[in-house]
Image: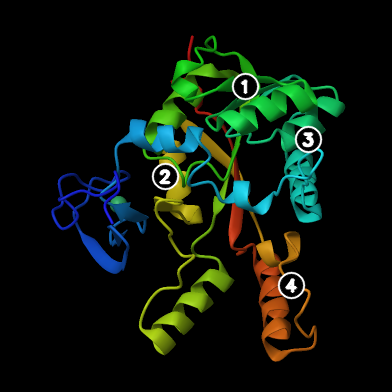
Amino acid sequence: MKTFFESPDRDRKTSGCILCNSFNWKALSLKDLFQIFKCKDCGLIFAYPIPDEDKVLESYSKGKSLESSIVEKQRENGERNFPEWKIKESMFFYRGITEYKRTGNILDIGCLWGLFLSIAKKKGWDCYGVEPFTEAADYAREKFGLNIFQGDIKKAHYPNNYFDVITMFDVIEHSVNPANILAETHRILKNDGLLCVGTPNLNGIYTTSQNIYGKLRFNKLTPNYLNPPFHFYGFNKKNIKKLLNKAGFEVIEIKTFSSFIMNNLIPPSKNIFSFKLLLRKCISILEDYTNSGDRMICYATKKHSSTNS
Ligand SMILES: [Zn+2]
């Protein structure tokens, strides 16, 4: 089956690693039309070849390649049925921001249905969202009365140094060109503003143990490790910091958390005393204790020398 993601260049390296320009890559696996590589120099994991940005954005505008559109099913009366874990997660994201900023205006890039922004709005923030998926952007506007730009952040044309806080949760790994989004973010964030980036941590204890298991048992990586065309990039604490630094940001803190605990991933049918579940719980506790969870949030400000005038 041919799709627009198909490219004859899968086996030909035409450009270096987006983080360190290295061509020193290790092939990890094949996923449909993509090769999954790891850069041996910076540890970035990425799908290759990266498809055309406009085509990916077009598919996002129709809600394709968005896992959340599957997770959050529509109720009969037209309301979104946000799962409890999603509300809990959004509250967690909100509390994290208030440790640095208490009030002002906030932009959520990839705001989807506007759940996170609806929480911030209730707390008195002046809220803005960017969302490529038309249906989600419309819902966020109509349901929560939010100021949403539907489309690509670069086309929203927000003023320079405008936002107190910019957030992007589970966006950067979906992006074809993370540097482009971060460059625009840098331009529109106030010089003393806060950037908050949430993404999976591929060096988390659970993710690592899953992959060791997959390698030993099936001689392949687990499918969730990097899943193009959902995820094009996979970061760890070290290289997300490098990416943000390269874009002119200074990382203040990286917090990780366990998606197993946060998102309550226990299937209701499972015996809660099963060995696998107990093992997973133990790993989650260890993840929390060592700040090595499978998801992470980076808090950053603009580097002093690179602030816009
Ligand atoms: Zn690299």
User: Image height check: is 305 above or below 265?
Assistant: above
Q: Mark 1 against mark 4, which lies toward the viewer? A: 4
- Give, as a three-letter code, the residue at label 1: Asp
Q: CA distance from mark 2 to mark 3?
A: 25 Å
In percent of width and height, residue 17 lies at 26, 48
Q: Mark 4 against mark 2, which lies toward the viewer? A: 4
The residue tagged 3 is 98
Q: Mark 3 against mark 1, which lies toward the viewer? A: 3
The residue tagged 4 is 266
Question: Which is more N-terminal, label 2 or label 4?
Answer: 2
Q: Is residue 248 visible?
A: no
- Give, as a three-letter code, the residue at label 3: Thr
Question: Which is more N-terminal, label 1 or label 3?
Answer: 3
Dot 4: within a 10 Å radius of its alpha carbon, few (fewer than 14), some, or many (20 or more) residues? some
> Element type at marker 4?
loop
- Give, as a three-letter code, the residue at label 2: Lys
Residue at the front extreme, as displayed: 76
In percent of width and height, residue 77 lies at 82, 39
Answer yes or no: do the residues labelled 1 and 4 have beta carbons within 8 Å? Answer: no
The residue tagged 1 is 192
Question: Which is more N-terminal, label 3 or label 2?
Answer: 3
The residue tagged 2 is 242
Q: CA distance from mark 3 to mark 1?
A: 15 Å
Residue 42 placement: quadrant = bottom left
Residue at (73% x, 37% y) in the render: 116
Q: CA distance from mark 1 to mark 4?
A: 40 Å
- Give, as a three-letter code, the residue at label 4: Ile
Residue at (40% x, 54% y) in the render: 228
| Viewer-closest of 217 and 106 | 217
Residue 286 placement: quadrant = bottom right
Dot 1: within a 10 Å radius of its alpha carbon, few (fewer than 14), some, or many (20 or more) residues? some
User: Image height check: is 224 above or below 156?
Assistant: below
